[in-house]
């Protein structure tokens, strides 16, 4: 079975400072990893994904994430936070094989608050 | 191009009534997914359609829930005899066929059961 943990319900950061939103995962095989962002009363917007290759993945709006196989982590990062980055962030995993990979499994979400 | 669309955006119903939620996927996407987002349970998978294959219904919480996908495009999620615990945001997503392909989500339908 696949699972995702986002250990922080909320992350607070000052505008201009770097931000990190943590994610760890568990799968039985190779993982496909995704980050989505949700603004109030909106659906999920895709930010970036790791499939294979370079462990550092760059995505939309200046976000990036680093895949670390030994630590089973896929933390989301941004060098300089903006107030407009304030939103709910979801990490998700999908397995390569078996029916468990018929869907994304999401973490519980982390609320990012960026203060001016 | 057009994204995933869902209707209605909001639905308020009385306990015991049936509801239908509609999803229009991105044109050309063969895979379609329904998820549910609620405060207590987070984001949960409900059902997955891929082309002409039998759907994966393993996430449906009870037999009151059903879904169909007509002509490989539009999908309808039906909840019969709604209960208060069915109150949630129902999200639809679509993608191309591979597991590595990105799922693109619609804006969701907020269902409130009184």
Image (tube, coloured by chain):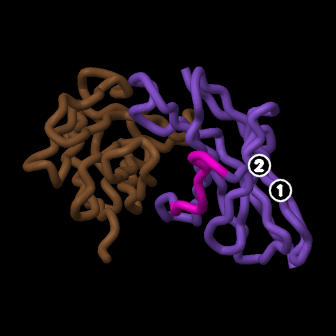
Chain colours: A purple, B brown
Quadrant for the N terminus of chain A in the image = top right
Q: Main secondary structure of the magenta part?
A: strand
Q: Residue at x 38, y 27 (%)?
A: B59
Q: Residue furthest front?
A: A53
Does the segment drawn in magenta span residue B9?
no
Which structural element holds mark 2? strand
Q: Are marks 2 and 1 in contact (CB under 8 Å)?
A: yes
Pinpoint residue B58: horizontal percent, then vertical percent: 34, 23
Residue plotted at (14% across, 38% down): B52
Total count of labels: 2
Camera-side residue of B110 and B48: B48
Q: Is residue A42 left or right of residue B61?
A: right
As displayed, is residue B61 above or below residue A66? Answer: above
Residue lying furthest left: B71
Query: Residue A73 placed where, x, y %?
Result: 76, 39
Number of the label disc, if any, that sits on residue A65: none
Q: Nearer the viewer, residue A57 or A100?
A: A57
- Letter of the chain that mark 2 sits on in the rendering: A
Question: Does the rendering let one see residue A63?
Answer: yes
Q: Give the SS element for disc 1.
A: strand
Q: Quadrant of residue A27?
A: top right
| Magenta segment boundaries in residue numbering | A45-53
**A15 is higher (above) or lower (below) than A39:** below
Provide the residue designation for mark 2: A75
Residue sitting at x 78%, y 52%: A21
Chain letter for mark 1: A
Q: Which residue is mark 1?
A: A20
Give residue B99's position: percent from left, percent from top.
42, 41
């Amino acid at each position: 079975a696949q699972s995702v943990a986002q250990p922080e319900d909320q992350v607070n950061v000052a505008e201009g400072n770097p931000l990190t939103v943590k994610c760890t995962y568990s799968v039985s095989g190779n993982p496909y990893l995704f980050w989505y962002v949700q603004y109030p009363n909106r659906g999920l917007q895709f930010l970036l994904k790791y499939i294979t290759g370079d462990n550092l993945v760059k995505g939309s709006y200046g976000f990036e994430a680093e895949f670390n196989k030994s630590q089973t982590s896929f933390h989301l990062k941004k060098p300089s936070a903006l107030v407009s980055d304030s939103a709910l962030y979801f990490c998700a995993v999908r397995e390569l094989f078996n029916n468990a990979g018929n869907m994304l499994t999401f973490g519980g979400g982390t609320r990012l608050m960026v203060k001016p | 191009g057009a994204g995933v669309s869902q209707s209605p955006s909001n639905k308020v119903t009385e306990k015991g009534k049936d509801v239908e939620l509609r999803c229009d996927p991105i044109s050309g996407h063969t895979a379609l997914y329904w998820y549910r987002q609620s405060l207590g349970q987070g984001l949960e998978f409900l059902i997955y359609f891929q082309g002409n294959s039998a759907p994966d219904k393993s996430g449906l919480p009870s037999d009151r829930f059903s879904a169909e996908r007509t002509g490989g495009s539009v999908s309808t999620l039906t909840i019969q005899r709604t209960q208060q615990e069915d109150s949630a945001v129902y999200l639809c997503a679509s993608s191309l066929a591979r597991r590595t392909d990105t799922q693109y989500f619609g804006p969701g339908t907020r269902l409130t059961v009184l």
